[in-house]
Image (cartoon, grey):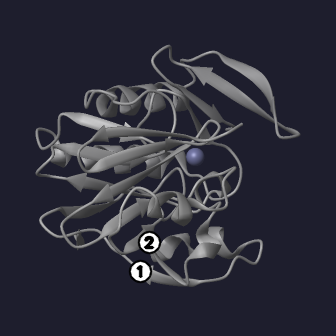
Amino acid sequence: MEHEIIRINENSWRIEDGGVRFFLLTGTEKALLIDSGMMVNNAKEIAEKLTCLPIVLLNTHADRDHTGSNREFEAFYMHPDEEENYRKDGLGGQILPVHEGDVLDLGDRPLEIIHVPGHTPGSIALLDRNARVLISGDSVQDGHIFMFGPFRNMENYIKSLEHLKAWDGCYDEVWPSHGSLPVSPDMVGKLIEGAKEVLAGKVPGEKQEFHGMTTTLYDLGYAGFLYDK
Ligand SMILES: [Zn+2]
């Protein structure tokens, strides 16, 4: 499937890439790719057609649907807790570590890093405070959130979303990597409740085959978790 480029506003694009999306944001000095796609292996080349600014890359996390074009970059921003997930199949490149509270400034466009471990250990969200947008990676979305297999931790996920509540009121829209865009900020609270209900055994599960693995879908109606206890 061919990728699709959609301009969100004057300085933001989303690139839909077969079930996942990545973003290009521009400031006055540089451009930031947020993730590098799944099917595409030329995210940088795609971005270069949209902006003349120098392009840097940040990964919200290292699942393979977010790192398709990382090879195009010698170095990229990533939370250091994601390194094991990133390197597991021998992917190279230099990780430029970002931590909670760090600010990446694209030039009149500061983006604040928020660490939200759970989906993966080094998952991060970015707050574009001036635009009042939270870019959430896979952690806040209305699709099926992968919480099965290595590197996932449901308890940490709940803690992270509770931590994210500290930024309530700072953003009006959530831009996730999967599912609808935008998603309403109240999804954070709904996912906390839903995840707690799943852990408490209150949500019926349905067996699912996924990439040759069997897991369980807990469908909440507004989103779902693929999870195994
Ligand atoms: Zn993903």
Residue displayed at 76% across by 78% down = 90
User: Residue 74 is drawn in which quadrant?
Assistant: bottom right
**Dividing the image into 4 quarters, which one contains the N terminus?**
top right
Q: Amino acid at mark 1?
A: Pro
Residue count near mark 1 (Cα–Cα under 10 Å), binned few <14, some 14–19, many ≥20: some
Left or right position of 46 against 176: right
Indicate yes or no: mark 2 CB to ligand 1 under 8 Å. no
- Whether residue 60 is visible here, answered yes or no, is no
Q: Report which quarter residue 146 is drawn in.
A: top right
Q: Earlier in the sequence, mark 2 or mark 1?
A: 2
Residue 171: % across, % down: 17, 40
Question: Looking at the figure, which quarter contains the C terminus?
Answer: top right
Query: Which residue carries the number 1 mark?
Result: 97
Locate residue 42, reporting x and y percent: 62, 62
Q: Is residue 184 above or below residue 67?
A: above
Spatial CA span between label 2 and label 1: 5 Å
Side of 136 relative to 11 (left or right): right
- The residue that appears at 70% across and 76% down in the rendered structure is 91
Write the residue at 44% across / 72% down: 79
The answer to whether any part of residue 138 appears in the image is yes
Query: Mark 2 touching mark 1, by CB under 8 A?
Result: yes
Element class at badge 2: loop
Number of numbered discs overlaid on the protein picture: 2
Quick check: 62 above or below 192?
below
Relative height, residue 116 to residue 94 (above, below): above
Q: Is residue 147 left or right of residue 150?
A: left
- What residue did someone put label 2 on? 79
At numbered mark 1, what does the secondary structure look like: helix, strand or loop?
strand
Which amino acid type is marked by label 2?
His
**Which residue sits at x=65%, y=36%?**
227
Whole-percent x, y for residue 216 in the image: 72, 28
